[in-house]
Image (cartoon, helix red, strand yellow):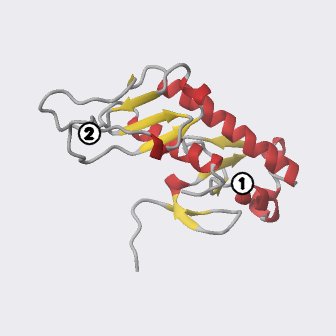
Amino acid sequence: MRRRSGPIRQCVGCYKVSSKSELIRFVTRGPSGVVFDERQTMPGRGFYLCPSRECFMAAPRNKRARGAISSSQAAQWLFHRVLDELAGSLREMLRGCGHAGRHTEGEGSSRVAGAVIVAGAAPGDVDLAPPDREPGPTAPVYTIPKDILGDRPMVVIDDKAPGFKALIRTVRLYERLCSGGRS
């Protein structure tokens, strides 16, 4: 049996059990509806969904989410609201983070960036290795829409930067939501 690290939760859409960090949390706020809990720290009763449109659309069938997401239209609206909130968070997090342009290493340096975030290109289309160097360990490449990065084609993030883990979690959730839930 495989051991999981950290807390695990169950998606109310597909009933899959996953690590808490891989799911999106919502907190029910009485009759007024549901609130997206991006940091997963709000007090109150909540439920979790996988970052996929299918799980959002299946949520109204679950009694835990039914009070907050009563119809497929409400689920669709919530899905787009979460996308918008994650995009806004990414804009904020990336505002002063990393450096723009092509990643190049200094002389004698073997340091690899923690992550590379590319605007609007497929990850396979980006060549991060300098042409005169042997291929070595590479940083993961994440793709997000161009409007989030503004005028920068790419951002290279150091894994020691403050907020790195939160940024990568947000990017992964955003990518999974945009790709239909595929990792």
- Secondary element under disc 1, as helix, strand or loop, is helix
Towards the viewer: 144 or 164: 144
Residue positioned 40% across, 33% down in the render: 163
- Residue 2, by quadrant, is bottom left
- Secondary element under disc 2, as helix, strand or loop, is loop
Q: Looking at the figure, which quarter contains the C terminus?
A: bottom right
Q: Looking at the figure, which quarter contains the N terminus?
A: bottom left
Q: Is residue 51 visible?
A: yes
The amino acid sitting under disc 1 is: Arg
| Residue with the mark numbered 1 | 53
| Residue with the mark numbered 2 | 112
Towards the viewer: 145 or 24: 145
Q: How far across and how far down the image is residue 85, in percent? A: 65, 34
Left of 37 or right of it: where is 156? left
Q: What crowding class fits label 1: few (fewer than 14 Cα within 10 Å), some (14-19), or many (20 or more)?
A: many
* Image vertical order of residue 36 relative to residue 182, above or below: above
User: Is the residue under label 1 in contact with that under label 2 (CB below 8 Å)?
Assistant: no
